[in-house]
Structures are given as structure tokens and as C-alpha cells.
Amino acid sequence: MKIQKNCVVSANFRLFDGSGELLDSSDSGGPLTYLHGAEELLPDLEAALAGHQAGDKLTVELTPQQAFGEHDPSLVDKAPRANFPGIEHIEPGMRFQTEMDDGAPMVVTVTDVDDQWVTVDGNHELAGKHLRFELEVCSVRPASGDEIEHGHAHGPDGHCDH
């Protein structure tokens, strides 16, 4: 079966940045499983998978604009340490959820801390990066009615036998 809308796809992957550094892979958490057409993946990644079938291997390279956008300096902010009441130990790499001016939730990552200020970055951790996905399609099956209705695949979906 070829990958098309309303198919559940399972694929092993390795994700690299533009310098070739391995950022993530399915080795640790098992294959990526998603409902094709439900906008669960980056649009250009999902488009590249369309038409493939179990056993196919492909490499997909994405520019920052196709992935998580360019790094936006306006999303980096210094906040007074007093804005983090009850949190005594703050260090770079910690993440907090905050609200944007319009009330939308936003996750920020601490990038620097001193006695008075905490610098946070609201950019996605992969913003500004060129990405390369190396993929092997493990399985493709029709989605169930519940999966289509809910907009995502349900439960684990097989393993690659290649």
C-alpha cells in the first residue's frame, strides 16, 4: 500500500542538522507512527513521504523555512528573576510555559541566568537549522474510523523487519 491520506505510517528515522550532527532517531523510542494527512508532521516532510510504501528508504532535506522557521530574536527576552516565584534553582535548558500577549501558550527555554535576570528563548529548539531526515518506511495501513475521527494514529504499529 502506498502512503496517502488517511493511512497510518510507521517509519524509522534519523534526524541530522546541517553540520551532520545526529539530533534524534527512532533507535531510542521506536518508529515514528503518524496519520498521513492529519498535519502531524512538517508539511514538506509529509509531502515527501506521500506515494512511498513499506521498505522504501528516502532522505529529505529541509531548509529552516520548511522546518521550524528562522530564529526570531524578538522571541528572546530577559525577565526579572522575581517573575519565577517559588523556583529557587533555575538553570539553562529548563523549560517553562508562559502566555503570549494574545493569551496563546508558549514554551520558553532558559538560555542564561544571573542573580537578577533570566534570559528565555521562545524559538523552537530547531529554529534556524537546516535538517536532514533519513527515513525507512516500515509499514503503511489504512486508518481506522476512530483514528480518522480523532486525527491521529492509535497505539503501537508494528516494527521494521528490514
Image (cartoon, rainbow, N blue to C red):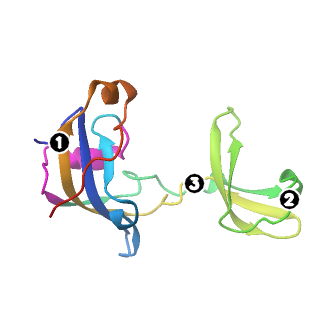
Looking at the rendered structure, which numbered label has been put on residue 61? none
**Label ID, residue 3:** 1
Tell me the amino acid under the disc marked 3.
Answer: Asn
Query: What percent of the width, then of the height, locates residue 86?
Result: 87, 54
Residue 13: horizontal and vertical position, in percent? 29, 61
Q: Residues within 10 Å of mark 1 (few under 14, many from 20)?
A: many
Q: Which residue is mark 2?
A: 81
For marks 2 and 3 on the same chain, the one whose residue lies earlier in the sequence: 2
Secondary structure of the residue carrying numbered label 3: loop
Residue pictured at 36% horizontal, 42% vertical: 155
Crowd band around label 2 with a 10 angstrom C-alpha radius: few (<14), some (14–19), many (20+): some
Does residue 53 show up magenta in the picture? yes
Q: Which sits earlier in the primary sequence, circle 2 or circle 1?
A: 1
Number of labelled discs?
A: 3
Quadrant position of residue 80 = bottom right
Helix, strand or loop at label 2? It is helix
* Residue that appears at 62% across and 57% down: 73
Residue placed at 86% from the left, 63% from the top?
88
The outermost residue toward the left is: 1
Reading the image, the residue beneath label 3 is 123
Residue placed most toward the observer, 156 or 64: 156
**In the figure, is residue 152 to the left or right of 61?**
right
Disc 3 and disc 1: Cα gap in Å?
Answer: 31 Å
- Residue 157, position in %: x, y? 28, 47
Q: Which residues are magenta?
A: 39-57
Magenta segment: does it hold 16? no
Judge left or right: residue 157 versus residue 109. Answer: left
